């Protein structure tokens, strides 16, 4: 494929840069640049700004409010928002449940949910993993029993990212306990304000609260909230996971982190010499850059295929593996480079404790700690290798 940009695409890049410069609030930029914790209002405020410009859903079809951008334009947009310290768009609504709704949902579901997602008015979370059913997702036990025009849902979801902020949750539930594992699952949309839902926090190693347990106790869900057909939820789940795993490639974010890592390397160390002159460090950084370049080209190929209507297959698993592992390597090298300045990292989850150390060190340690999850969420990398073995090698 041709990886050079046309004059029109170069002009589009300048348009995106200009828009960000004129519309991104300074405080939001500062928080993102320093790796600080973003509140719900921060993320939704940026979504509203993008939506007002008509850029709220870069990958959606135009008829549902999307941009109609080419794969190259989407790539440029993602790169610029990452490079210029913009908050990330909430993926659970924009990139995950929305494509399921506009592809498989009813007209009523599209009318009810898509405007709130793109407009930054409704926050979604994902109800997939359960205790004992994470990578082996098909073994999930949360049940949905038919009762007139409702389902009665009982179960326990875990590692539910940002559920404490969520207005709605999309859930995989078992509607036919007698069917084979994948064949008895359905895809439900559930209002988080429904009686019987309890959210309990899980505090992770970075001292942050981003994931939760969600308990569902006799939660009554209208059958109109069933997406597609009953017992066909596994098909919709695989469709959604393809979109999620492609996003976990994190190419734009990794390129930004490499630039910041070079700032660390250029800073003077205690011995008076910058790390940029250290042969071992330069070798590690160069290998990361080479691997990131290869990942970027692979990601562009997947985007180009998607623009032609080809859904992501095993390529999504490949991007997930390489992108998540590369993201971990970048944060590991940054923490090594910072040395003792990596430890006193106040400011992300403890706003009353200022960061102690050089400005370029802010945010790296919590990023390193939380980054341990990269190779787990979205389907662990071990499972992704199994997916590749089956889809590509036929094993």
Image (cartoon, rainbow, N blue to C red):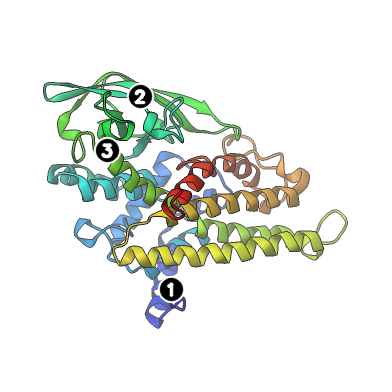
- The Cα–Cα distance between marks 2 and 3, rounded to whole angstroms, is 14 Å
Task: Assign a secondary structure to mark 3.
Answer: helix
Relative height, residue 346 to residue 288 (above, below): above
Q: Residue at x 46, y 26 (%)?
A: 132
Give the side of residue 111 with respect to residue 79, left or right. left
Going from N to C along the chain, the mark reached first, 2 or 1, is: 1
- The Cα–Cα distance between marks 2 and 1, rounded to whole angstroms, is 50 Å
For residue 292, what is the image quadrant?
bottom right
Q: Residues within 10 Å of mark 2 (few under 14, many from 20)?
A: many
Q: Which residue, given by chain and number where applicable, does mark 1 sit on?
A: 14
- The Cα–Cα distance between marks 3 and 1, rounded to whole angstroms, is 42 Å
Going from N to C along the chain, the mark reached first, 3 or 1, is: 1
For residue 136, what is the image quadrant?
top left
For residue 186, what is the image quadrant?
top left
Q: Residue at x 46, y 75 (%)?
A: 3
Tell me if label 2 and label 1 are in contact, CB under 8 Å. no
Give the side of residue 10 with respect to residue 259, left or right. left
Tell me if residue 121 can be seen.
Answer: no
Give the side of residue 210 with respect to residue 214, left or right. right
Instruction: Count the marks.
Output: 3
**Residue 20 percent coordinates (x, y):** 43, 63
Tell me if residue 95 can be seen.
Answer: yes
Q: Which residue, given by chain and number where applicable, does mark 2 sit on?
A: 141
């Amino acid at each position: 494929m041709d990886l050079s940009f046309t004059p029109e695409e170069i002009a589009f890049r300048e348009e995106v840069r200009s828009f960000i410069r004129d519309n991104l609030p300074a405080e939001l930029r500062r928080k993102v640049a320093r790796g600080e914790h973003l509140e719900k209002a921060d993320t939704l405020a940026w979504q509203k700004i993008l939506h007002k410009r008509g850029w709220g859903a870069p990958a959606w079809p135009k008829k549902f409010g999307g941009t109609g951008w080419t794969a190259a334009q989407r790539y440029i947009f993602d790169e610029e928002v990452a490079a210029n310290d913009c908050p990330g768009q909430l993926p659970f609504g924009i990139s995950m449940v929305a494509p399921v709704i506009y592809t498989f949902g009813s007209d009523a579901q599209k009318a009810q949910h898509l405007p709130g997602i793109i407009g930054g008015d409704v926050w979604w979370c994902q109800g997939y993993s359960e205790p004992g059913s994470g990578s082996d997702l098909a073994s999930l036990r949360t049940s949905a029993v038919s009762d007139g025009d409702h389902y009665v849902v009982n179960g326990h979801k875990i590692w539910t990212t940002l559920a404490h902020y969520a207005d709605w949750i999309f859930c995989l539930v078992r509607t036919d306990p007698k069917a084979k594992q994948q064949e008895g699952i359905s895809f439900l949309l559930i209002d988080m304000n429904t009686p019987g839902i309890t959210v309990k926090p899980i505090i992770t190693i970075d001292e942050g609260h981003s994931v939760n347990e969600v308990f569902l106790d006799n939660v009554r869900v209208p059958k109109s909230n069933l997406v597609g057909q009953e017992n066909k939820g596994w098909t919709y789940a695989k469709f959604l996971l393809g979109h999620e795993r492609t996003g976990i490639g994190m190419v734009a974010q990794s390129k930004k982190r490499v630039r910041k890592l070079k700032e660390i390397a250029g800073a003077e160390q205690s011995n008076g010499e910058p790390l940029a002159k250290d042969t071992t460090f330069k070798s590690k950084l160069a290998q990361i850059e080479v691997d990131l370049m290869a990942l970027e080209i692979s990601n562009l190929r997947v985007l180009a295929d998607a623009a032609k209507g080809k859904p992501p297959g095993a390529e999504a698993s490949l991007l997930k593996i390489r992108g998540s592992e590369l993201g971990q390597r970048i944060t590991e090298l940054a923490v090594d480079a910072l040395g003792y300045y990596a430890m006193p990292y106040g400011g992300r989850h403890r706003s009353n404790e200022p960061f102690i150390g050089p400005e370029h060190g802010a945010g790296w340690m919590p990023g390193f700690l939380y980054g341990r999850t990269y190779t787990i969420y979205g389907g662990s990398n071990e499972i992704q290798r199994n997916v590749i073995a089956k889809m590509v090698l036929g094993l």
